């Protein structure tokens, strides 16, 4: 089952994926109670990538060394932690909203040796949100649609805290 934080509220719309491996792969979407089933896996060790819907503002998670024996049920309960989020509005110097921009928030994780990232898009009003962020200091990059007259921007040292909103308006 996939649950949210310590309260163990079932989480729907989260996805569990085992990346393609030599020994097999699978995919599942949890139901409204948080239950999921990945069927047809052959014996082996798997890494699960749990990716909740951005609307839930939960941190995605990798679970390594999930041992599966073909023909047997392997129980793997998952607790997802609440995330922080970056929200704001993107506009030009005259206050005109910039829509269809992609906003990336990322940082280098020394523990895993990987970039951790999430992204979102600005809507017609220039509003955006990037959710499911772990507590940390992020670089935020904004890319614009092809043909845009605006210049992409990058901002560094943007602090994010779990369960809190960081407001970052960009002009």
Image (cartoon, helix red, strand yellow):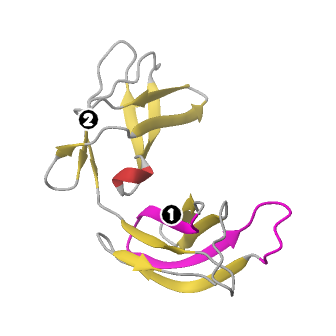
Find residue 135 and report its image quarter.
Answer: bottom left
The one nearer the camera, 84 or 73, is 84
Q: What is the magenta range?
A: 125-151
> Label 2, on which residue?
34
Please state, as top left, top right, bottom left or bottom right, where the C terminus lies in the image. Answer: bottom right
Find residue 153 and report its image quarter.
Answer: bottom right
Q: In the rendered image of this protein, does residue 140 appear above or below residue 122?
A: below
Where is residue 103? Give x, y as percent: 61, 67
Give the label on residue 20, or none.
none
Q: Residue at x 55, y 25 (%)?
A: 23
Asked whether, in this view, residue 41 is left or right of residue 71, the answer is right
Disc 2 element: loop
Give the label on residue 112, or none.
1
Quick one: which residue is furthest to the left in this view?
Answer: 7
The one nearer the camera, 108 or 82, is 82
What crowding class fits label 1: few (fewer than 14 Cα within 10 Å), some (14-19), or many (20 or more)? few
From the viewer's perspective, is the residue at label 2 or at label 1 nearer? Answer: 2
Q: Residue at x 48, y 36 (%)?
A: 17
What crowding class fits label 2: few (fewer than 14 Cα within 10 Å), some (14-19), or many (20 or more)? many
């Amino acid at each position: 089952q996939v649950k949210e934080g310590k309260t163990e509220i079932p989480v729907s719309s989260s996805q569990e994926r085992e990346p393609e491996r030599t020994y097999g792969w699978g995919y599942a979407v949890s139901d409204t109670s948080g239950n999921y089933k990945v069927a047809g896996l052959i014996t082996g060790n798997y890494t699960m990538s749990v990716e909740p819907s951005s609307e839930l503002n939960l941190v995605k998670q990798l679970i390594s060394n999930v041992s599966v024996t073909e023909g047997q049920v392997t129980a793997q309960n998952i607790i997802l932690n609440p995330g922080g989020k970056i929200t704001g509005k993107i506009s030009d110097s005259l206050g005109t909203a910039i829509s269809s921009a992609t906003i990336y928030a990322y940082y280098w994780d020394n523990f895993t040796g990987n970039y951790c990232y999430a992204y979102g898009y600005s809507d017609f009003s220039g509003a955006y949100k990037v959710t499911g962020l772990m507590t940390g200091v992020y670089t935020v990059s904004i890319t614009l649609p092809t043909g845009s007259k605006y210049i992409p921007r990058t901002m560094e040292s943007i602090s994010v805290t779990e369960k809190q909103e960081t407001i970052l308006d960009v002009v």
